[in-house]
Structures are given as C-alpha cells and as structure tokens.
Image (tube, rainbow, N blue to C red):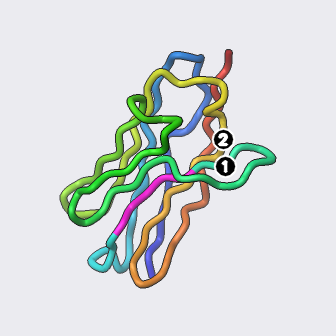
Amino acid sequence: QVQLVESGGGLVQAGGSLRLSCAASGSIFSIRVMAWYRQAHGNERELVARITRGDITNYADSMKGRVAISRDNAWKTVYLQMNSLKPEDTAVYYCYVETNNGYWGQGTQVTVSS
C-alpha cells in the first residue's frame, strides 16, 4: 500500500508558476513510476508528466516546455514545477504512483485566472 498526499495547488494568474508536491508513504520501495495527471471539469483525466525508476520522463504535448517533474532521492516526494500557466491549465491535479498496483492522491485544485 502507498499513501499519497498532494499540496501546492491554488489560484494563480496567467503566466504565473506553481510547484506541486506529492508525499508518498508506505511501500515506497516498490514504486516504479511517479506521475501527475489532471482532470478539468467535464474532461477525462489526462497525463501531465511521469518519471520512472530510470529517471525517464514523459510530458503531455500541451505542457512540454512549461512543466518539469522531479523526485527526491528517496522516492518519497515527487514534484511538478509548472510555469507560464494558462487558464486552460485549470484542473484538479492528481498524483499517481505505480507499484504492482496503482495509487492515486486526493487531488489538488489549480486555478489559473486570465
């Protein structure tokens, strides 16, 4: 079992930045992938960024060049640095980790005002 707690969401003006954090606890030794997803109102949940044990990263095309995913050495925390935010980035952002199972955080709201 892995427990996830996100933080760092909030209200920001267009062009601003936010840094999201996700603290993992429990069976963190078995984590293979850490990722961020988002879900805007009325839309499906979509991948924003992911990082693997080999530190391979993938980003959604819509956010390439504006976001960076990183983690601490202990695989206890994953971060999402978001820059040049746009109103269309408004969504609930979810942390996700993969072991033999998948685990989701509770989500953190990001609102970008125009």
Measuring from the top left, give residue 58's x and y in whole percent: 37, 50
Q: Residue at x 44, y 32 (%)?
A: 82
Q: Is residue 9 left or right of residue 23?
A: right
Q: Secondary structure at mark 2?
A: strand
Q: Does 54 appear above or below 10?
A: below
Write down the residue under mark 2. 91
Which residue shows up at 28% across the image and 52% down it?
A: 71
**Place of residue 37 in the rendered image (x, y in percent of width and height, measured from the top left):** 54, 53
Q: Which residues are magenta?
A: 33-37
Q: Return the residue nearer the eye: 56 or 98.
A: 56
- Locate the N terminus and report the quarter of the image it occupies: bottom left
| Left or right, residue 86 beside residue 41 | left
Three-letter code, disc 2: Ala
x, y (%) of residue 24?
39, 65
* Secondary structure found at label 1: strand
Give 58 or 10, whichever is nearer the viewer.
58
The verdict on residue 4 being magenta is no
Earlier residue among tags 2 and 1: 1
Determine which residue is flagged by label 1: 39
Residue 12 occupies quadrant: top right
Q: Does the stretch in magenta take in 34? A: yes
- The dominant secondary structure in magenta is strand
Instruction: Name the amino acid, label 1.
Output: Gln
Instruction: Identify the residue at image location x=32%, y=72%.
Output: 32
101 above or below 113?
below
Residue 26 tag number: none
* Quadrant of the image containing the C terminus: top right
Local crowd at mark 1 within 10 Å, few (<14), some, or many (≥20)? some
The residue lying at 65 percent from left, 24 percent from top is 87
